[in-house]
Amino acid sequence: MSCLFCRIIKGEIPSFKIYESSKVYAFLDINPLAEGHTLVIPKFHAAKMHEVPDEYLAEIMPAARKIALALGATPDDTFQYNILQNNGTLAHQVVQHVHYHIIPKPNEEAGLGVGWPQTPTDFDALKKTHEKLAAKIESLSK
Ligand code: AMP
Ligand code: ZN
């Protein structure tokens, strides 16, 4: 077994565990973008999100929510954070085991910096995209 994160789940490589259930494991990122930067991973080896069975994915966001609360999230909105999940090297994925980053955003400098290169489009282009995508998703089994 050569996958780094599978080895972390098994305890073969040390990690600072934050949360664990039968389907997910969460631990501190070794090179945090901000204090408390945590990774949530399914206990199922897959490189990309769409390869992970629903029963594992179903536990990711509840775990992320607990972690956000533990990090300091409150209803008053002072604690800010990003959730990031990269799929593919071009999309900035380095470790080839699905992982969700929970990244506190304490100020402008720390935490995640985001580029957002939007391209203006028009109604017709959106309509064509919608037709393709809606038809495709309809054909997928649940
Ligand atoms: P990504 O670019 O989305 O693949 O992010 C991979 C993340 O895994 C990076 O933020 C790394 O700092 C983190 N990472 C790599 N090795 C370890 C490790 N042994 N323990 C904790 N985090 C790690
Ligand atoms: Zn793995």
Image (cartoon, rainbow, N blue to C red):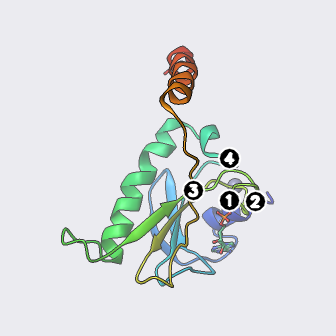
CA distance separating discs 2 and 1: 5 Å
Residue 45: x, y in percent? 67, 49
Q: Does label 2 point to a residue whose CB lies under 8 Å from ligand 2? A: yes
Secondary element type, mark 1: helix
Residue shown at the point (58%, 75%) measured from the top left: 29
Residue that label 1 marks: 6
| First in residue order: circle 3 vs circle 2 | 2
Residue 63: horizontal and vertical position, in percent?
40, 58
Ligand 2 rendered quadrant: bottom right
Q: Secondary structure at mark 2?
A: loop
Q: Earlier in the sequence, mark 1 or mark 3?
A: 1
Q: Is mark 3 within 8 Å of ligand 1?
A: yes
Three-letter code for the amino acid on which mark 1 is drawn: Cys
Q: Amino acid at mark 3?
A: Gln
In the displayed structure, 127 sits above or below 36; it is above
Question: What amino acid is labelled 4 in the image?
Answer: Ala
Q: Looking at this view, is 70 or 94 the one in front?
A: 94
Report which quarter residue 33 is drawn in. bottom right
- Say which mark, if any, is on residue 3: 2
Task: Give the CA distance from mark 4 to mark 3.
Answer: 13 Å
Is label 1 within 8 A of ligand 2 (CB to nearest ligand atom)? yes
Q: Earlier in the sequence, mark 2 or mark 4?
A: 2
Quarter location, residue 1: bottom right
Q: Measuring 61% from the left and 63% from the top, which residue is drawn there? A: 9
Q: Nearer the viewer, residue 137 or 122?
A: 122
- State yes or no: discs 2 and 1 in contact (Cβ < 8 Å): yes
Local secondary structure at mark 4: loop
Sequence order check, earlier mark of 1 and 4? 1
Q: Position of residue 126 (x, y in %)?
A: 52, 30
The circle on residue 46 is 4
Tell me the crowding category of disc 4: few under 14, some 14 to 19, or many 20 or more residues within 10 angstroms, Cα based: some
